[in-house]
Image (cartoon, coloured by chain):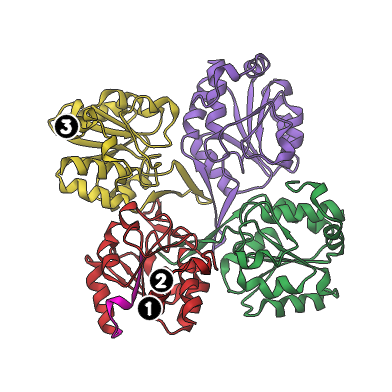
Chain colours: A purple, B yellow, C red, D green
């Protein structure tokens, strides 16, 4: 989806997009709307965007590695990532450490990483990567750290939007 | 419900509506708001509009065949269609192939099909049928392909609205 | 809650409220936002407003009988009504028949009934009772039949609002 | 998150914040958006804000006792509080009695309590404590009792916002 207008994409952003070799997402607030549904039995659910899958498929078609990093260990993250057939790292107190590990694993540099987050626990990662992205409804503290803010909110197609954007320029 | 004003319905649209012999819906984003709720156990849920049932009942009263076509195979689609007592085809990589099969089965032409969708994987179908319809919150890429856009969003009464519209002119 | 301003309540409405001897609610779209959550297993859930209970308690304190009438037979209606400790009648093809039965049971007249609905299957009841009420987001076809439209939408406090209104004038 | 502007915080409010020795929250409408999801099986769920946890962690780091008080006894409250590792008192007909008990337990005064609520059953507590707080979407009857109203609604980060505010001035 082109909610972004191609003309709005600066030359600097195009360059950053073309450089991307590794795509890393925060989970809550990015794949979800940051809400968690809690049942009497203590079972948690989250709400995601069905069409995020279409965008991720296109990215995978480009051969780009796609990872989800989540501070908490939560079965709901595993469940969603399994469905979307993407990898996830959970239970990492320091997300940047996890990002750096992935950078080594895929033999690229931090400059070639797109990291997408929404909250203060994404600050270190957003400050360290080449293409920091935040969702429309990100917390104010992190918005200024981003090179791109999606038009759609987390859990309402933000992932799909960024996938479409990368695909458009890297395909 | 007449959220549409009868005066707004062009003569061309009236003709297209009168021609309809087969009604086919996409599921996610049309019967639902395109969100999917994922639990820790990996169980998916979707949110639908209770009053869609009232509209579908009226259409069935006219003797029109009503089908749901979904790319994915998902028990949640079966569950909702069973409740609404409409048929569904799932797991079709190419939705247009499924539409053409139905056209043959019901011995009508593509011109006599109403197809309602919301996203890029509906493009082929929307381009091929006589009355392509999209929901209020459809992805921009498909809006221009439609002869009618509902006032209500998917999962918030879009199905009910289109059923009421057809019923109004075909009853 | 007084979202209504007392000055806005006409003398006619005050009279109608004072006359109320029996309070009858539709369920979907009144206690809920008209959405239904459907799981893979076909289990349905609805979303209600926690504070509706506070309003209903006050009404019960006045000794007014409170009933829910639902066309469909659905365990989710029973579950919510049980929690709120109010009675419900389900599976009535003709809601007006059910309303008339209750009128006889409580030895009052249709003029003394408050009926609250949101959709076309409430038309007969809304046209027959003394105080027809609709929710903020009721379907257009029924809005003109009402003597009062709540400021809050169904599932977002409409029930609480009407309870508070009645309590205010009948306490 | 600083949705509040520091300049907007009056000297009186700063003093009140600095005085806080005990933080007490209502649950429904504060940790949640006041909706309750009811399944066919009568199982209730509520929707919370994932990032409330980040704020509560910071407050706990300051050594402040944090409690949740709920009129109803509901397993969903226990489930959420357990996850957030905060204590809760449930089934208290009179919330103010529970607040006073906590004040004694923590050897502070009512003036040193922050109480956050959203509805009429919070009136007594809001009137009795030193720092009464309400959520953005609180019922009108309680808004005037508050010294601070959050910018965010209950279940959409109101808890996180107030935690950030206290932390900012007490750290």
Is C107 part of what is drawn in magenta? Answer: yes
Label 2 and label 3 in one chain = no
- Residue at the location (57% across, 38% down)? A153
Q: Mark 1 points at which residue?
A: C20
Question: Can you tell which mark lies on residue C51?
Answer: none
Question: Which chain letter matches label 1?
Answer: C
Q: Give the range drawn in magenta.
A: C106-116
Q: Residues within 10 Å of mark 3 (few under 14, many from 20)?
A: some
Mark 3, chain letter?
Answer: B
Residue D39 sits inside the magenta stretch: no
Q: In this view, does A169 lie above or below B158?
A: above
- Mark 1 to mark 3 CA distance (whole Å): 50 Å
Q: Quadrant of residue A32?
A: top right
- Per the image, label 1 sits on a secondary structure element best described as loop
Q: Nearer the viewer, residue C125 or B33?
A: C125
* Residue that carries the numbered disc 3 in the rendered image: B19
Residue C2, x across and y down, in percent: 54, 68
* Residue name at image x 85 percent, y 57 percent: D14
Tag 2 secondary structure: helix
Residue D132: x, y in percent? Answer: 74, 66
Considering the image in quadrants, where does the C terminus of chain B appear? top left
Residue C13's label in the rendered image is 2
Q: Which of marks 1 and 2 is in front?
A: 2
Mark 1 to mark 2: distance in Å?
A: 11 Å
Question: Could you tell me how far apart the alpha carbons at marks 2 and 3 are, in whole angstroms?
Answer: 48 Å
């Amino acid at each position: 989806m082109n909610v972004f207008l191609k003309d709005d994409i600066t030359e600097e952003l195009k360059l950053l997009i073309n450089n991307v070799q590794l795509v890393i997402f925060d989970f809550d607030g990015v794949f979800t709307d940051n809400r968690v549904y809690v049942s009497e039995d203590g079972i948690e659910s989250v709400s995601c965007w069905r069409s995020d899958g279409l965008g991720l498929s296109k990215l995978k078609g480009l051969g780009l590695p796609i990872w989800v990093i989540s501070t908490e260990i939560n079965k709901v993250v595993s469940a969603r990532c399994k469905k979307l057939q993407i990898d996830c790292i959970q239970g990492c107190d320091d997300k940047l450490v996890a990002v750096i590990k992935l950078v080594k694993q895929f033999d690229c540099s931090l400059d070639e990483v797109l990291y997408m987050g929404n909250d203060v626990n994404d600050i270190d990662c957003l400050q360290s990567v080449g293409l920091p992205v935040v969702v429309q409804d990100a917390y104010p503290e992190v918005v200024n750290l981003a090179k791109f803010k999606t038009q759609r909110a987390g859990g309402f197609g933000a992932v799909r939007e960024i996938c479409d954007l990368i695909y458009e320029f890297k395909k």
